[in-house]
Image (cartoon, rainbow, N blue to C red):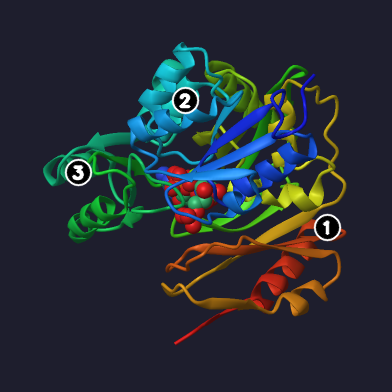
Amino acid sequence: MYGSPLSSQARKMLLLGSGELGKEVILEAQRLGVETIAVDRYANAPAMQAAHRYHVADMLDGAAIRRIIEEERPDYIVPEIEAIATETLLELEQEGFRVVPTARAARLTMDREGIRRLAAETLGLPTAPYRFADSLDELKTAVKELGLPCVIKPIMSSSGKGQSICRTEEDIEACWEYAMEGGRAKKQRIIVEGFVTFESEITLLTIRSVSGTSFCAPIGHVQKDGDYIESWQPHAMTIEQIKEAEHIAQRITDELGGHGLYGVELFITQDGVLFSEVSPRPHDTGMVTMATQDLSEFALHVRAILGFPIPTIRLLSPGASHTLKADREHTEFNIGGVEKALALPNTQVRVFGKPETKVGRRMAVALSTAEDVEQAREVARQAAESLWIEYKQ
Ligand SMILES: Nc1ncnc2c1ncn2[C@@H]1O[C@H](COP(=O)(O)OP(=O)(O)OP(=O)(O)O)[C@@H](O)[C@H]1O
Ligand SMILES: NCC(=O)N[C@@H]1O[C@H](COP(=O)([O-])[O-])[C@@H](O)[C@H]1O
Ligand SMILES: [Mg+2]
């Protein structure tokens, strides 16, 4: 039971991170009459445009985050990005604030080392072989041990930032430099992973709520330079593969606990399913559920957070998503082609409303449903390719 937003009895949700995923979380929370507050490093971020109010702060500045939370006193603190002052979240949780799904889940998944060691070493889940390195020399040793090719990533980064594939010994130094530039924080540690030749990769959306653990149909996706380009649902898998995938997702999410939606990333290989990483929040590849499911991943996250039941999740149709990315840095631009995209059958577009473009920045997504996944992928691709960015001089 709770009052209307902006009243003294309101239920308040505060998002740490205010991108395209958070915008949808805010909209779903508002549908259930929740008061919403968005926080991010820059003004006019997508979720800020939909929230009741917003704050701008450096997300890695614990004192700044604490000041905002003490002022707002939200019922739920909902991390929306990886790189936040998670030490402060752990303290706030100790003091009685509710962190979604838990402060420990946010802490462990912010750092590739925390979650990888937990999954592979504590839980014994199958993963790619890996090493960590703090210097170029340590990286060279790691590459020798793992063999080539291998994948190099800053331990704190997302959407492929700072990630590269090292194919020859001559590449090692450039990969090191690239990782140093691409990480979210100034910490120099990196993870080196053996390159997995997977048949496909999926996100298994896994929800922990008062109704127990629920799984969505697997979402297949294609990534380029470590960032997602297209996704589709359902991804065709054998019963055995689904069982393995759900087993891994259940183990890792049981360990991380709390209530909320998780995106469990898995590689499907000839030798079985491997754990890759997990987001304790809605996943970019899961945007497809806005077209395919009766309850999107955002609606599911909000229901789980608020303690409401999730008796069923229905996949209404096969569908696909395809992204529009910017190719220049600019503050004055227009997004065109929406009318052409929307002329395609069973197609929707989400324009995120980000105030600036950057090279590779995701600006919009096309969502299509069709009789089967192949057709949906084709229509979503056409829709995304109809969209374009006009940069002012
Ligand atoms: N060890 C690996 N072998 C082969 N491909 C890999 C490996 N690690 C990552 N990739 C590829 O790079 C993509 C991005 O990697 P990862 O999910 O670890 O990065 P990320 O920056 O956390 O991305 P996001 O934030 O979008 O989830 C993977 O989805 C996969 O396509
Ligand atoms: N893979 C994670 C992911 O997709 N996260 C989404 O991207 C935003 C950051 O975008 P930006 O870098 O364009 O500001 C985040 O706030 C989140 O919505
Ligand atoms: Mg990933």
User: At numbered mark 2, what does the secondary structure look like: helix, strand or loop?
Assistant: helix
Q: Earlier in the sequence, mark 2 or mark 3?
A: 2
Above or below, 324 against 190 in this view is below
- Please name which of the two marks, 2 or 3, marks the residue nearer to the observer: 2
Disc number at residue 139?
A: 3
Q: Residue furthest bottom?
A: 393
- Measured from the top left, where is residue 100 in percent x and y? 57, 26
Asked if labels 1 and 2 touch by Cβ distance under 8 angstroms, the answer is: no
Disc with the residue nearer the chain's start (2 vs 1) = 2
Q: Residue furthest front?
A: 8
Circle 1 residue: 372
The alpha-carbon separation of the residues under discs 3 and 1 comes to: 44 Å
Quarter of the figure with residue 216: top right
Position above or below: 213 against 355:
above
Report the quarter where the C terminus lies: bottom left
Q: Position of residue 137 (x, y in %)?
A: 12, 43
Q: Quadrant of residue 309?
A: top right
> The residue tagged with tag 3: helix, strand or loop?
helix
Q: Residue at x 71, y 21 (%)?
A: 209
Closer-to-camera residue (370/310) = 310
